[in-house]
C-alpha cells in the first residue's frame, strides 16, 4: 500500500519535472536578461576565485578530500 503510494508520487514528480525541462513551457518567463545576469554572476565568481588565488587552495582541498575517501 505505502509502496504503491510512494511509486505514484515518484511517477507524478518525474512526469512534472520532465515536462518542465523538456516541454513546451520549459523557458516560460525566462528572458535574455535573466540568462545574461546568470552568466555575469558566474563569470564574477570565476574571476574572484582567480584574483584571490583560491584556485590552488580549492583544488588542493578537493585532492585532499579525494585522498581521504579512497585512502590514498
Image (spheres, rainbow, N blue to C red):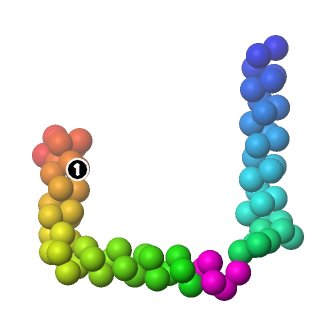
Range of magenta residues: 31-35
* Furthest residue in direction right, as rendered: 24
Relative to residue 19, is residue 14 depicted above or below?
above
Residue designated by label 1: 66
Question: Whole-percent x and y of residue 31?
Answer: 70, 81
Q: Kindly identify the residue that appears in the image at 76 percent across and 56 percent down.
A: 18
The answer to whether 37 appears left or right of 52 in the picture is: right
Q: Kindly identify the residue that appears in the image at 20 percent across and 81 percent down.
A: 51
Quadrant location of residue 56? bottom left
Number of other residues with Cα within 10 Å of mark 1, as a class: few under 14, some 14 to 19, many 20 or more: few
The answer to whether 61 appears left or right of 47 in the picture is: left
The answer to whether 21 appears left or right of 51 in the picture is: right
Q: Residue 1 versus residue 41: which sits nearer the camera?
A: 41
| The N terminus lies in quadrant | top right
Quadrant location of residue 47? bottom left
Q: Kindly identify the residue that appears in the image at 46 percent across and 82 percent down.
A: 40
Relative to residue 63, is residue 6 depicted above or below?
above
Amino acid at each position: 500500500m505505502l509502496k504503491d503510494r510512494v511509486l505514484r508520487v515518484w511517477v507524478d514528480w518525474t512526469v512534472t519535472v520532465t515536462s518542465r525541462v523538456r516541454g513546451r513551457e520549459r523557458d516560460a518567463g525566462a528572458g535574455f536578461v535573466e540568462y545574461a545576469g546568470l552568466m555575469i554572476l558566474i563569470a564574477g565568481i570565476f574571476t574572484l576565485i582567480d584574483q584571490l588565488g583560491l584556485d590552488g587552495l580549492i583544488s588542493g582541498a578537493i585532492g585532499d578530500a579525494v585522498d581521504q575517501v579512497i585512502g590514498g
